[in-house]
Image (tube, rainbow, N blue to C red):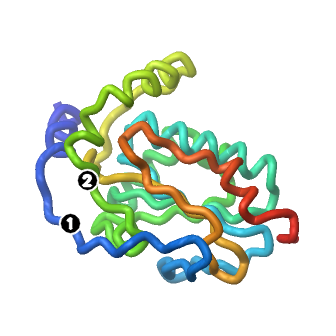
């Protein structure tokens, strides 16, 4: 019953912070919460994922696991919009510690970090669209399905990703066009080139 109520609550309207324009490629990245800096010599991937329980969020974490295998040393920051305890429980449930062991996991229930990077809310057509049918089917074939919706989750919150160099400059960005529009972080890391050591 609690999960059913969380599912309903995740669709209800709620207030949102004012959303800034997304930082353009070549411009400085907005700052992250205390303790997360951009000085990593291998660059930083910042992933704003969908709600706890969303199969697309889980898939993006698996994709980030491939990133750390292919580019050891890259800093991965995952931003989730549930409260800290719920975010950590979701992270453990999907195997996050094994996939991305050195992640910087940010809980952003007020969604201010999302807003500072220009990651706002989805329109009706972004959540209820035929474009997510094929990706959902593909994920189901991989064994990734919608799981328990985490408390505080909001399905209207959009997702997106950014690749930032060691100087804090955005080198790649993507704001999702719909709920199933995921980031290709392996391709995105090419924006850092081979000069990052």
The mark closer to the camera, 1 or 2, is 1
In which image quadrant can residue 36 be found?
Answer: bottom right
In which image quadrant can residue 155 be found?
Answer: top left
Q: Which residue is mark 1?
A: 16
| Secondary structure beneath label 2 | loop
Instruction: Give me the disc on residue 1.
Output: none
| Disc 1 to disc 2, C-alpha distance | 13 Å
- Which tag, 1 or 2, sits closer to the chain's start? 1
Vertical placement of 104 versus 49: above or below? below
Locate residue 141 relative to residue 103 in the image: left or right: left
Locate residue 58 relative to residue 192 in the image: left or right: left
Q: Residue at x 63, y 42 (%)?
A: 63
Q: Residue at x 32, y 26 (%)?
A: 130
Classify 10 Å Cα crowding around label 2: few (below 14), some (14-19), many (20 and above): some
| Secondary structure beneath label 1 | loop
Locate residue 130 relative to residue 31 in the image: left or right: left
Of 137 and 53, nearer the camera is 137
Q: Position of residue 135 (x, y in %)?
A: 46, 27
Q: Which residue is mark 2?
A: 152
Q: Residue at x 31, y 61 (%)?
A: 120
Which residue is the extreme one toward the left? 13
């Amino acid at each position: 019953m609690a999960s059913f109520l969380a599912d309903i609550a995740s669709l209800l309207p709620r207030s949102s912070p004012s959303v800034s324009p997304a930082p353009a490629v070549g411009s400085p990245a907005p700052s992250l919460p205390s303790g997360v800096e951009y000085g990593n010599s291998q660059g930083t991937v910042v992933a704003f994922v969908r709600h706890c329980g969303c199969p697309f969020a889980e898939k993006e974490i698996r994709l980030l696991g491939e990133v750390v295998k292919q580019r050891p040393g890259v800093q991965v920051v995952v931003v989730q919009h549930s409260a800290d305890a719920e975010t950590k429980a979701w992270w453990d449930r999907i195997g996050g510690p094994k996939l991305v062991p050195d992640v910087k996991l940010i809980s952003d229930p007020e969604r201010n970090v999302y807003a500072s990077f220009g990651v706002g809310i989805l329109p009706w057509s972004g959540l209820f669209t035929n474009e997510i049918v094929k990706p959902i089917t593909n994920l189901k074939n991989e064994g990734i399905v919608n799981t328990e919706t985490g408390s505080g989750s909001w399905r209207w919150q959009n997702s997106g990703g950014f690749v930032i160099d060691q100087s804090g400059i955005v080198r790649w960005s993507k704001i999702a066009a719909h709920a199933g529009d995921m980031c290709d972080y392996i391709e995105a890391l090419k924006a850092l080139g081979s000069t990052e050591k």
